[in-house]
């Protein structure tokens, strides 16, 4: 009951929530079949493309692969500076 | 023409053989003719779970290689009129047979039985390819753990590549752990794997005790696990099986709203 209350009030996640989060990430990678080094290379190329058009910190570009149902989604996030001319 | 259903999971030790034994027996109790095929060549176990280990003369590899007729290798379960076992070989390797040979064996069995249940070995190599070769549909067994679900997902992908539709059995759910937030719920597993649910088997001591004796739980008493296997068997036959029992009170509704309950989504 206490655990339920804590979860309800948002204090800490239950271990099942942790498991679910881990599975979403692991399965996203399993399903695409993209291994770590290839993923890193893809991130670097995406960062380079953005950097061609906008001032960015290439190191701070983050990519995330996540899965919902059987759909796998790629999210690229980056702070954008001024457009380059 | 009968239906060939492969029971598979990727990961070992999640309850494939127990599920095969109990579902096959429950289907036979419903009046269907059933043959259980142990496709785990080299590590046979379905015979001991069924309690038929002392009656093996020939096995699946003998039947495939023509050492005996298929009928000769079938063991009749004397407890029911219409239940048979085709045991695996204990001394051969997984590559003693090919997927093509398995496919034609299963096809032959489908002509004589309503259900051909194939107990798949763990893993995704040759043994798996043999086991799924003749299957029309699949039951994926997963326990509510990260490793089991990950492997199940891999297997679902491989089954899809082979155009075999899969339905899910969640095994060894412990309702109080789910309630406490320390076990993935049935709906979590369904959501992650995106599969149609056939049923959820609770963690049940009766399975350990009946397996010790070589008697499928569905033949003994009314344990929670046995009841659920009976429900799944009905669903497999297309008979309406009532929904799993779930609380209907105020707290159960709150629990469902919070996703804490083990009731179906």
Image (cartoon, coloured by chain):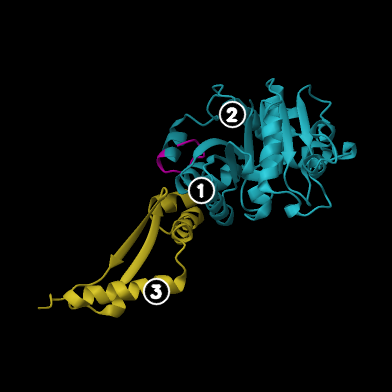
Chain colours: A yellow, B cyan
Circles 2 and 3, Cβ within 8 Å, touching? The answer is: no
Q: Sequence order check: which comes first, mark 1 or mark 2?
A: 1
Query: From the viewer's perspective, is B204 left or right of A70?
Result: right
Query: Mark 1, mark 3: which one is toward the viewer?
Result: 1
In what element is the residue under mark 3?
helix
**On what subunit does the disc labeled 2 rest?**
B
Regarding residue B204, the answer to whether it shows in the image is: no
Residue furthest to the top = B31
User: Where is the N terminus of chain B found, in terms of image quarters?
Assistant: top right
Separation of residues labelled 1 and 2 (CA atoms): 23 Å
Which residue is under mark 2? Answer: B236
In what element is the residue under mark 2?
helix
What span is in magenta?
A: B257-265
Separation of residues labelled 1 and 3 (CA atoms): 28 Å
Query: From the viewer's perspective, is B184 left or right of B254?
Result: right
Q: Position of residue B77 (x, y in %)?
A: 81, 29
- Circle 1 Cα neighbour tier, 10 Å, few/some/many (<14 / 14–19 / ≥20): few
**Looking at the image, is B170 positioned above or below residue B69?**
below
**Looking at the image, is B1 positioned above or below residue B97?**
above
Regarding residue B55, the answer to whether it shows in the image is: yes
The circle drawn on residue A40 is 3
Separation of residues labelled 2 and 3 (CA atoms): 46 Å
- Majority SS type along the magenta span: loop
- Circle 3 Cα neighbour tier, 10 Å, few/some/many (<14 / 14–19 / ≥20): few
Residue sitting at x 48%, y 35%: B264
Which residue is under mark 1? Answer: B161
Residue sitting at x 61%, y 48%: B9
């Amino acid at each position: 009951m206490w655990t339920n209350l804590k979860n309800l009030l948002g204090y800490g996640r239950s271990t099942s929530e942790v498991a679910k989060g881990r599975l979403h990430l692991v399965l996203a990678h399993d399903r695409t079949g993209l291994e770590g080094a290839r993923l890193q290379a893809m991130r670097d190329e995406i960062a380079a493309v953005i950097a061609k058009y906008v001032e960015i910190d290439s190191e701070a570009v983050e990519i995330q692969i996540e899965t919902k149902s059987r759909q796998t989604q790629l999210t690229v996030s980056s702070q954008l500076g001024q457009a380059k001319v | 023409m009968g239906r060939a259903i492969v029971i598979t999971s990727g990961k070992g030790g999640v309850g494939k053989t127990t599920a095969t034994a109990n579902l096959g027996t429950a289907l036979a109790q419903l009046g269907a003719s059933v043959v259980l095929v142990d496709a785990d060549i080299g590590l046979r176990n379905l015979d001991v779970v069924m309690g038929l280990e002392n009656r093996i003369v020939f096995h699946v590899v003998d039947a495939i290689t023509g050492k005996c007729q298929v009928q000769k290798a079938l063991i009749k379960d004397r407890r029911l009129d219409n239940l048979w076992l085709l045991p695996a070989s204990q001394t051969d390797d997984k590559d003693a047979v090919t997927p093509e040979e398995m496919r034609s064996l299963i096809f032959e069995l489908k002509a004589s039985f309503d259900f051909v249940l194939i107990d798949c070995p763990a893993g995704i190599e040759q043994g798996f390819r043999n086991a799924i070769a003749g299957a029309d549909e699949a039951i994926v067994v997963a326990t509510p753990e990260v490793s089991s679900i990950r492997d199940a997902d891999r297997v679902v992908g491989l089954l899809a590549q082979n155009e075999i539709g899969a339905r899910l059995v969640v095994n060894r759910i412990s309702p109080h752990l789910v309630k406490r937030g320390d076990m993935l719920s049935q709906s979590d597993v369904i959501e992650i794997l995106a599969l149609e649910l056939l049923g959820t088997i609770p963690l049940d001591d009766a399975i350990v005790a009946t397996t010790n004796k070589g008697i499928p739980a569905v033949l003994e008493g009314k344990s929670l696990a046995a009841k659920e296997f009976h429900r799944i068997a009905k669903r497999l036959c297309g008979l309406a099986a009532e929904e799993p029992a779930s609380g209907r009170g105020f707290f159960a509704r709150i629990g469902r709203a919070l996703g804490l309950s083990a009731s179906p989504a």
